[in-house]
Amino acid sequence: MKPIVQISLDVIDLKEAIETARMAMRAGVDWLEAGTPLILAEGLHGVRALRREFPDVPIVADLKTMDGGYLEAEMMARAGATHVVVMARAHEETIRCVVKAGRDFGVKVMGDNLGCPDMIAGAKWLEELGCDFVIHHIGYDERRGIAARGLRMPSPLDQLRQVVDAVKVPVQAVGGLSLEQAIACPSHGAPLVVLGAPLTIDADAFKTADGNLEASLRMICDAVHAQTV
């Protein structure tokens, strides 16, 4: 598939999220993500607001669903999300419920392998249960905690190629990537490039990062869109 750039709106203020999304659209971003902090702060209202403002843009609702899968997916679909996220560490039945809701309401399901003891097996499990995409994810707390103990911070690039080779669905790599690493994801077989903290969002304050963000986003989008997978 053609590489896609997704911006994760991991902010807690709806006005700021919409302003950031407008800037991202001008820069060439393809998908918007209602990040977990935004969903916690604004819930369905945040997703509805993004849908009103951007009627034709795919919107990922990063629910990180662990239970109540059908209802959560249905609610976000009715609010305007086109993609929802379920965790591989959820019970099998929860994943199946999210997948069923996805089929019933016309939304795609992204399965997230965050925290899996075996990340490759977790990705395969998500695909087997019907997820449309795999998010290969090294978590915020995991990265920071390990680095604070003086150890090498893990990266999704460590096993990205193995995950890509293990599944047939498109893969997205998430978790502390540098700008250069994010741009290189399609060359590793992962066509869904997500931009969030720390590239576009201040990871500590959950605010849009300072600097000429629009110009940086445009450069990233041009570099990603020029590639093939």
Image (cartoon, grey):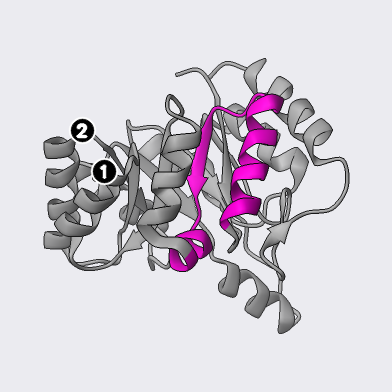
Please give the name of the residue rendered at 67% of the width and 56% of the height, measured from the top-left corner. Answer: 197
- Judged from this view, the residue extending furthest toward the right is 211
Q: Position of residue 52 (x, y in %)?
A: 44, 36
Type of the residue with mark 2: Gly
Judge whether 189 appears above or below 143 on screen.
Answer: above
Q: Give 202 or 168, whichever is nearer the viewer.
A: 202
User: Where is residue 226, by image quadrant?
Assistant: top right
Magenta stretch in the rendered image: 14-41
Judge whether 159 appears above or below 106 on screen.
Answer: below
Type of the residue with mark 1: Ala
In the picture, measured across the screen, residue 59 lies left or right of residue 10, that is: left
Please give the name of the residue rendered at 73% of the width and 81% of the height, measured from the top-left corner. Answer: 148
Disc 2 packing (10 Å; few <14; some 14–19; many ≥20): some
Please give the name of the residue rendered at 19% of the width and 55% of the height, measured from the top-left corner. Answer: 95
Name the residue that disc number 2 marks. 106
Based on the picture, tell me whether residue 36 belongs to the magenta stretch.
Answer: yes
- The local secondary structure at tag 2 comes to loop
Quadrant housing the N terminus? top left
Disc 1 packing (10 Å; few <14; some 14–19; many ≥20): many
CB under 8 Å between callouts 2 and 1? yes
Judge whether 112 appears above or below 167 on screen.
Answer: below
Dot 2 or dot 1, earlier in sequence: 1
Based on the picture, tell me whether residue 210 belongs to the magenta stretch.
Answer: no
- The local secondary structure at tag 1 comes to helix
Name the residue that disc number 1 marks. 77
Please give the name of the residue rendered at 54% of the width and 61% of the height, measured from the top-left corner. Answer: 138
User: Where is residue 109, by image quadrant?
Assistant: top left
